[in-house]
Every structure is written in C-alpha cells, then in structure tokens.
C-alpha cells in the first residue's frame, strides 16, 4: 500500500505521519507538496497531517480546503479509497465538506498538548478493524481548535450511521458527545483530532496508534486480493 502525505505551507506533523506509516507500519509513503497533484494518481491512501496550514489564517483548515489538491482528494475519496485527516487534517476535511460538522476553539480557549484516553466506538471500519469495540487507547492531543460541533440533525445522522469512531474518555476540549473522530457515511474518510502517528512506538509513551495504520494496510490488502 502506498500513502501520500500531503504537505501544505505550515504543516508540521507530516514527517511524523511519514515515519509512522513507512518506518514503523512498513508501507510505502511519499511526502507530496500540495501543488504536486499528479503524484496522487497512483497512491492507495491519502494522509492529511496536523499543523497550521496557511498559519490557520481565517479559520483552521479553511485556506487549505480551497486548494487544488482537494479536488484530487475528493476524486480519490469518491472512488472509495481511504483518506485520513488528523488534527489540522480533520479541520481541512470538515472545511472542505468531506466530513460534516466543524472544529471550534477549545472550551477553555487554550492550546492543549498531552496524552488522552479514547474509546474505540466502532471497530468495523477500514481504520479500526484491529481494535476491539470499546477498547481504550492512549493518543496524544495537540490542538487549540479541537472542539467538535455539529447541529442536532447531523449528530443524529452520525449516530444512526455509526459514523462516530472515537470518543474521549475524559473530554478535554468540549466536543459534543465527547467526539474525537468521525468517518463519512461511505466509511473511507476518517477525521480525528488526536494523533495516532505520535503513538506508534512505546518510546513515545504509547504504541496504540499503530493498529490504526496496520488496519488500513490489512484492509487494503484484503480489498486488493479480492479485486485482483
């Protein structure tokens, strides 16, 4: 499986993501500058890393969501290929309409950076199949605008379609229903505020995030074997 790690001006978790999927999970990966859209033609998965794309100007993720590369990413997602957005990547996915809702300022209006416990609400996804349902995992968070919000109609739809993938065990930022990560209805786009790529080795304090990337690789291999 080959991943493209999209690099925007201001991305700062791109090399963490690259290291996680290539050096630890063992997949192919390439750092792709956001204007090099031709490099997305032959990739199997797209990763939108954290950071401060365009300096979080206007709103976090809003500038990046209008870039040309997002057209290619929409095409990629429409074909059922996996897209993972972490932190700023999650913000970009909501701003671009690939995921519903929005990320607002943390309830205490301060930047937060620490380990957080999450609950795996759905392990029947492309991204979480190696976890147990209800499993508690530890990922770090590092955000100032991670407070997930959506209206009641959207929230009910998320629940009805099992689109809530991760919740916080102890909500740090005020996210509605403790939401830490959601997927699209089709199931191939996941956005989350906590950082699985920073939790792939015990040296970092947790290797709980490694199962997420290995789930993606395993499910891609299964899909490839079926379609081969």
Image (cartoon, rainbow, N blue to C red):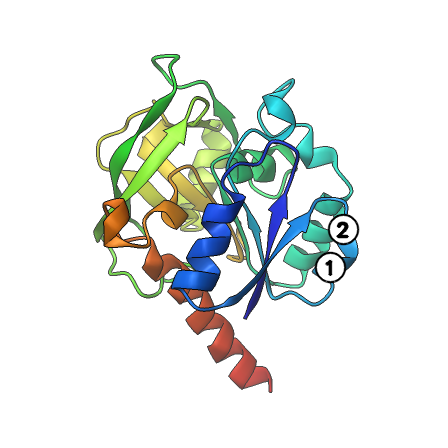
Query: Dividing the picture into quarters, in which one does residue 227 lie?
Result: bottom right
193 vs 57, left or right, is left
| Residue drawn where x is 34% and y is 45% of the image | 166
Would you name the residue on which mark 2 appears?
36
Placement of the C terminus among the 4 image quadrants: bottom right
Q: Are marks 1 and 2 in contact (CB under 8 Å)?
A: yes
Would you name the residue on which mark 1 appears?
39
Mark 1 → mark 2, Cα distance in angstroms = 6 Å
Mark 1: secondary structure: helix
Viewer-proximal residue among 25 and 110: 25
Mark 2: secondary structure: loop
| Residue drawn where x is 54% and y is 40% of the image | 89
| Residue drawn where x is 43% and y is 22% of the image | 144
Viewer-proximal residue among 164 and 220: 220
Query: Dividing the picture into quarters, in which one does residue 61 lie?
Result: top right
| Residue drawn where x is 24% and y is 61% of the image | 132
């Amino acid at each position: 499986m080959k991943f493209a790690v999209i690099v925007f001006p201001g991305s700062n978790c791109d090399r963490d993501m690259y290291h996680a999927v290539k050096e630890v999970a063992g997949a192919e990966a390439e750092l792709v500058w956001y204007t090099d859209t031709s490099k997305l033609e032959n990739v199997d998965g797209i990763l939108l890393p954290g950071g401060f794309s365009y300096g979080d100007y206007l709103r976090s993720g809003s500038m990046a969501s209008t870039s040309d590369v997002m057209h290619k990413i929409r095409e990629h997602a429409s074909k059922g290929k996996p897209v993972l957005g972490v932190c700023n990547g999650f913000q970009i996915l909501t701003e671009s309409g690939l995921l519903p809702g929005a990320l607002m300022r943390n309830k205490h209006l301060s930047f937060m950076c620490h380990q957080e416990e999450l609950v795996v609400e759905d392990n029947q996804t492309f991204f979480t199949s190696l976890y147990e349902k209800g499993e508690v995992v530890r990922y770090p968070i590092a955000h100032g605008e991670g407070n997930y919000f959506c209206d009641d109609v959207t929230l009910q739809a998320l629940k009805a379609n099992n689109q809530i993938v991760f919740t916080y065990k102890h909500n740090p930022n005020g996210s509605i229903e403790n939401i830490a990560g959601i997927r699209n209805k089709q199931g191939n786009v996941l956005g989350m505020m906590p950082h699985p790529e920073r939790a792939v080795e015990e040296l970092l304090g947790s290797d709980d995030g490694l199962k997420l990337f290995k789930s993606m690789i395993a499910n891609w291999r299964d899909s490839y074997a079926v379609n081969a």
